[in-house]
Image (tube, helix red, strand yellow):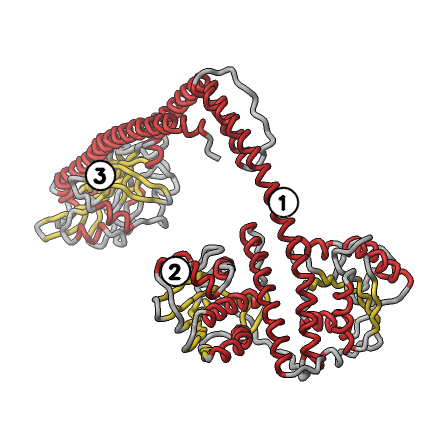
Amino acid sequence: MHTIRIKLLAPFILGTLALALVLTGYAYNAARQALADAVLLISQAKSAQASSAINLMYKSMSTTMQNMVADPHILKLFAKPRPHGAEDAAQLWLEAIIHGNDYYRDILIVDAAGTCIASSNPERIGNVYADRPFIPQALRGVFDFDDISVGRVTKKFSVTASGPIDSADGIVGALVLIGDFPKIVDYETSASHDSRTIFTALMNPQGSFIAHKNPKLMGSGTLRFPDLYTELASAGERGKEVQYTLEGDSFIGFAQLENKSRTLVVTSGIRDEVFAPAYMIGFTLFFISFLFLCAISFIVFRFANGILSALLSLIQYAKRVSEGDLELQLEATARKDELGILHNALRSLVGVLQTALHQSHEASRMKGAFLANMSHEIRTPLNAIIGMAHLSLRDGDLSAKQLAYMEKIQLSARSLLGVINDVLDISKVEAGMLAIERIPFNMKETAENALAIHQDNALNKGISLSLEYSAAAPVFLIGDSLRIGQILNNLIGNAIKFTAQGSVSVRCWSTPAETPGAAIMHLSVTDTGIGMSQNVVNMLFQPFTQADASISRKFGGTGLGLAISKRIIELMEGNILAESEEGRGSTFTFFMKLPLAEQQHAEEDSFSLADAFEHLDIKTRRILVAEDNPINQFLLQEMLAPSGAQIVLANNGEEALEAVKTQSFDLVLMDMQMPVMSGLEATMKIRALPTAQFLPIIAVTANAMEEDKNKGFACGMNAYLTKPIDPAELLHALRTWLADGRTPSTAHQ
């Protein structure tokens, strides 16, 4: 969490840090550039020095060679006839030259066959050197030099030069001069910083290092780098700044090509070693800046701590209050400044909030209790009305007129039940407790069922009611079919209500979803009714909103259905839109994102609802009905009568508990609110009995709130049926807990 302390000090700290980084970067770059310039100057000077030394060495040997091949001592060796004593004179002359020059190691004179006929080293006389590459070159009239090498013992630079001996008869032999010169470059590790960082290396045209600080590279016949030679030799005689990579290290320096020997002179250093001082300067400056930043921050913290601590304590208190801790008390302060005013104002505001919250909680509690009580009190007589209508329609021998009366009674009672359910749903929406199920269902079947419910009403008004389900749309999905049916029922019911003639059509299609294995399902309900203005459309989805007072009086309705539908659709990642024009009808379109499900195989039921109870095959079962209302007792008995099951009545929870203790039952239908002992208490005590731990107990109650249902399951009930009792739901419960062959000992497993 970003505290105000951080927000106040962050600009200062970040600014100081940015300044330190800028200064560090500037100092580092300046030091790096200075080092780079120094390295370039040193490298250039060293390369030029080494190149000049090599050039001077070659010029010296070349001059010596040209003087010697024309000397009479040599020419006498090839004269015809050869003068007496010429060999001895030549031998003495060669030895004198060697002794008089520290740089020449040996001199050889070979004939046209490559055989040594005279040498400063008598042991060489008679040896054949025709296989040496410089001998054929000299015999062809070319002054040639062999590649420079470093002696393994002497550690000196060794160069072999050869030249033609030309007499009156043409080229008759060759002169070979072998010289050992002092170190032109330092190829051994030195103690000086300069040599450690920057060193000069020599490379021959074959890519081998003649001289290098690394002993593994110097003079190696196997480690050759012809590509590197080609790359660096492009510097030419004038040379240039170079950067290259060798054996994994990055180098920077200066390269120059000695033209006569084609020897490449490279003076360079490893980049990281060259710029190490710049790194150290940058790090040192940053470290000093960081210490300065810490010191300044500490001083600022010390001076600002008093004000910030008081302010932060108020913020922390406000945060805890906003999280619901309104019982926390803020002590009075003696401060007279702006913080003191803020402190007292916050203390007073929280006091007002505490009072308002207490009143709100009390009002919410009273509202919840009122809704629960009203729901229970209304559902109880409704259960009798709808139940009696159901029994009359099922068993009564009624005339057509009486049958119509009973159907209207049942329709009106169900309409009233719908109003009650809407009121409960909107209270759940406001409390954020409306839950959406995620189970496989058949979308097409859900839409068809919604149309079937309103088919008679549409026919009575002379309105055509149709469904168009796209062939490309998926049928089997995962979602809350009950809530989707509720939305369709509301939209279709409204469409029929506000349409005097014409049609009401329902369409269903799909579009691909971004998530694999899902689809965006679209449903629309279009009517040819009275339509609405845009102002009315803008208010449609607000709770308790109708088009206007005259329409409300004419058509009725609570104005809750669309608000509930919108909230349900939003919970399914969708939205609902309305398009309408006065006198031209309306279209309500909604979409939702639903996962795809595998195809379901519905079980066929060949029996009608009236006959289904008779085919349950539970004639040997005993059912305990715990119900305090005589009418509801009668209703349950009559509904269960076709099944043939034996019914035992209990007027309250205590009687139900005693009945279970003394008798054997296969199922208990338990009311929640009963005198003497409630259904919840009776259920918990029944579950405590060793013989009734797995006895199926189904709640049959007018308590329809979600918290009531949770309490029922928590105390051990297996299923929950709300009044008015739906015969189909009662039938499903009996099938689930009795007709599948379960016994009281296994029903709860």
Pointer 3 residue: 241
Query: Distance between the Cα atoms at labels 1 and 3?
Result: 87 Å
Single out the mark in the foreground, 1 or 3.
1
The part of the image, by quadrant, that contains residue 453 is bottom right
The residue type indicated by label 2 comes to Val
Single out the mark in the foreground, 2 or 3.
2
Pointer 2 residue: 537
Residue at the far right in the pictured view: 662
Looking at the image, which residue is at 75% across and 80% down?
Answer: 614
Query: Distance between the Cα atoms at labels 2 and 3?
Result: 79 Å
Dot 3: what SS? Answer: strand
How many residues crowd around disc 1 within 10 Å: few (fewer than 14), some, or many (20 or more)? few
Dot 1: what SS? Answer: helix
Which disc is residue 365 wearing?
A: 1
Could you say which is closer to the camera, residue 679 or residue 71? 679
Dot 2: what SS? Answer: helix
The residue type indicated by label 1 comes to Arg
How many residues crowd around disc 3 within 10 Å: few (fewer than 14), some, or many (20 or more)? some
The part of the image, by quadrant, that contains residue 525 is bottom left
Query: Distance between the Cα atoms at labels 2 and 1?
Result: 34 Å
Q: Earlier in the sequence, mark 2 or mark 3?
A: 3
